[in-house]
Image (tube, grey):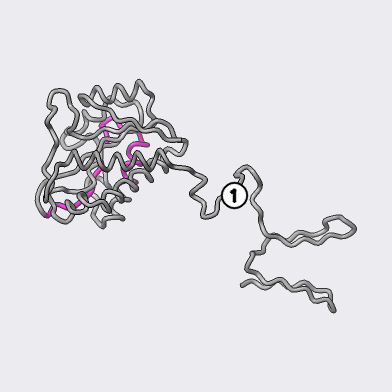
């Protein structure tokens, strides 16, 4: 249902390749860095971003805010056109909905620990995968770009140093790889607690029916499996008690 492709090279090259492949959506993953107390999530969209990009970006930011208990920066979680234009070139050539993620600050010791931990990485991956599934339920090819890494002119760029060890780009790549695994193994049928054997078959709904001479004369559907149904033979009354 979902297929993921990582794009490399200069940012404009990545975007044009994603356009050529007719990607359904495009994500570039970064982390933020400033002071040890910096604390918010923000998503960048291109200055020419579609309404889908903006609402998707805000939804992702809200999910991160809820999951990690961090405030939302920018305008309700997004910055259209980036930081004084920074980030805009990473997205402006895309022909599909596209967002640039800066979910946590790797300069903040607490948030850096989340980024470095497998639990935190799994949460970040799930938030991103869930947002993609929500906004692009039809599946398709999803383009991923690791911020800073794999550029032709600056091949050694890895972005900001992460408090406690490692680099921004390497952890962003880990999160995207985990997201890729979630998306490519996603099965809508498994989202049910007990999936029907055949999703095309009519799902059974509890009901009570009165049949006379092999003809249905009354059907009651406002009943639940937990309701108590009792037939009074003497008075010929059917009692339904909601539990």
Q: Does the magenta portion include 10?
A: no
Residue 167 horizontal/vertical position (percent): 14, 42
Is residue 153 toward the left or the right of residue 227 in the image? left
**Boundaries of the magenta span:** 37-59
> What residue does disc 1 label?
196
234 lies above or below 128 = below
Q: Could you say which is closer to the camera, residue 229 or residue 61?
A: 229
Please identify the quarter of the rendering in which residue 228 is found: bottom right
**SS state under label 1:** loop
Q: Which residue is drawn at 20% across and 36% down?
A: 82
Quarter where residue 32 is shown = top left
Residue at the outermost left position: 35
Residue at 19% in and 39% down: 170
| Image vertical order of residue 81 relative to residue 39, above or below | above
Is residue 49 rendered magenta in the image? yes
Q: Does 101 appear above or below 16?
A: below
């Amino acid at each position: 249902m979902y297929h993921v492709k990582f794009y490399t090279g200069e940012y404009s090259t990545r975007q044009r390749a994603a356009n050529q492949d007719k990607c359904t959506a495009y994500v570039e993953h970064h982390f933020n860095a400033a002071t040890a107390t910096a604390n918010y999530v923000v998503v960048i969209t291109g200055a020419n971003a579609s309404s889908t990009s903006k609402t998707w970006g805000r939804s992702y930011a809200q999910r991160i805010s809820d999951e990690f208990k961090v405030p939302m920066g920018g305008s309700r979680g997004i910055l259209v056109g980036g930081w004084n234009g920074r980030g805009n070139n990473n997205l402006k050539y895309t022909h599909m909905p596209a967002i640039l993620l800066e979910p946590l600050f790797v300069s903040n010791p607490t948030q850096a620990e989340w980024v470095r931990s497998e639990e935190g990485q799994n949460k970040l991956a799930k938030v991103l995968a869930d947002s993609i599934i929500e906004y692009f339920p039809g599946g398709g090819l999803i383009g991923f770009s690791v911020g800073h890494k794999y550029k032709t002119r600056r091949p050694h760029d890895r972005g900001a140093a992460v408090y406690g060890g490692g680099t921004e780009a390497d952890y962003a790549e880990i999160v995207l790889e985990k997201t890729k695994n979630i998306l490519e193994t996603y099965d809508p049928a498994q989202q049910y607690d007990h999936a029907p054997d055949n999703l095309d078959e009519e799902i059974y709904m509890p009901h009570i029916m009165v049949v006379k001479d092999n003809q249905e004369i009354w059907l009651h559907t406002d009943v639940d499996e937990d309701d108590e149904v009792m037939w009074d033979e003497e008075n010929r009354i059917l009692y339904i008690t909601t539990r």
